[in-house]
Image: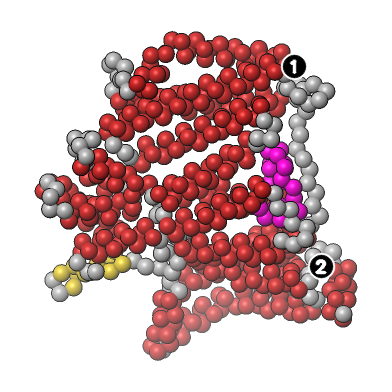
Amino acid sequence: MENQNLQYTYAQLDERVFLMDKKDRAFSILTALLVTPTVSLTLWGGFNIGFTLSLIAFTLLFGFYLGGKRALLSPFSVIALALAVCGFFVYTVSADNTVRLFLFLPLTLGLFLWLLNISGYEIKDDCSVISVCISGLHTMFSSIGKSVKSFFALGGKMGKGMGKALIGIACAVPAVIVVAALLRSSDAAFDGLVSKIGNSFGGFGSTVVKIITGVLCFPLMLSLGLGLSKNKKEQKLMGIKGAVDKIFIISFLSAISFVYVAYIASQFAYFFSAFRGILPEGITFASYARRGFFEMTAIAAINFTLISLACVLIKKDENQKQSKLFNGVVVFIAAFTVLLIATAVSKMVLYIGQFGMTRLRILTSVFMLFLAVLFIAVILRVFIKRVQILKTGLIAAMLLLLILGFADVDKTVARYNLYAYESNLVENLDVNAIGDLGEGAIPTLYEIYSNKDYDVSLRLAAKKELMKDCEKMYQSEYVDGRTVYTRKRSVGDFNLSRYKAQRALDRFLGIE
């Protein structure tokens, strides 16, 4: 009771801090303890298993802290959380940096929306998705100063003493570094002890940098939790009242639609030849596929922008409904875009069948599929008002990137090209192209090298590529007249794809 009165009195005296209870204090301390290991395992671990474990730990921490009776669990936020959790493990399974980079944004957004939902924000439609993100970010960033002050005042005098102690330790860091350096130079035993400790944590200097980086990241993570928990939820729904007359917008979109109709009529044979597997005369497979993709990308971007602006700016009737003619024009433009995407995909399939797979061809195809889902959602939205385009786009992006991550694009491309060569679907096997792929292709390279049934030139090319991979993934030393290879390791850097690649290289080097 006395402790509660002390907290209440302290909060009254200084309104610049949050009123902290036991749950808040526990969250603050656990966040402080987790931040530096998270930074170390993530940034210095190369976004591998350490990143996965860190995301799991923080998701559990924030979930238990923010969740409660007031938690609002919409189906969308639950699905977003489930996909985000699956995405955590992509960083342990896949070494494909491109896929992991593109996955980071939708994964973070899905997780953020779930946190906002369980902390009291409602996510009903696409407008609420935008408004919730803006409100949540404002709450988080505006609470940084107050959250840090609250952490250094955990429960009054004891908290203020803790804050002073932490500040004192932080100020002592430079002196500790100087004293430790002098002692290391004066005593061999102490130097050996510090070296062993430093090597265990990646070097003394590296450890200091990790701690400093963790300290810099701590206020943001703390304010995310305390801000969402303590600040009053002021969710302002975004809404733009359309002011442009529908006749103008319909006429504008109809003129563009007329151009598309003429375009389809003039290019009918060109567009649909890919569906029949026929190459237009005088055009190579490469230019045919590229031309279709870039046409589709430009037109899809223009169409989505025009449709979005038109839906926002058009003046609606008293019941906030759009005219049927406007909806018809929107459906036509979206359907035309889907048709263009389907044509581009068919061209890419024709191109892959002729020349085999590459990373770019796979990623391009998946991107086109994402665009198709987006425009199908636009069409469905006209007829079914419950369909949400932004939500559909986020879920589709996460699902497609999860498939790419768990399938391992490099492995898939390498395995398919080898299969196509063995099945006589393609005339040649480009081993150098397989070598240019990432770590997921290394087991396939070793399979080519170790299979004596393959042509000698293919095996020699595979050996050359494997030697290049050894130089990248191993440290080499010249000992007793021979080269000795050892794996490069760091804490939290385990990755399943890299592990399989290193196993194949171990067999190649004979050090298994």
Q: How far apart, in angstroms, are the residues tagged by discs 1 and 2?
A: 52 Å
**Residue 169: which quarter of the image?**
bottom right
In the picture, measured across the screen, residue 48 lies left or right of residue 378, that is left
Viewport quadrant of the C terminus? bottom left
Which residue is denoted by mark 1 in the rendering? 245
Task: Report the amino acid beneath label 2.
Answer: Leu
Q: Residue at x 56, y 47 (%)?
A: 106
- Pick the front one: 151 or 306: 306
- Res 19 label: 2
- Pick the front one: 68 or 209: 68
- Pick the front one: 193 or 327: 327
Task: Report the amino acid beneath label 1.
Answer: Asp
Q: Position of residue 41 (x, y in %)?
A: 49, 65
- Res 309 label: none
In the picture, measured across the screen, residue 379 lies left or right of residue 451, that is right
Question: What residue span does the magenta drawing correspond to?
Answer: 114-133
Q: Residue at x 71, y 24 (%)?
A: 313
Disc 1 or disc 2, which is closer to the eye?
A: 1
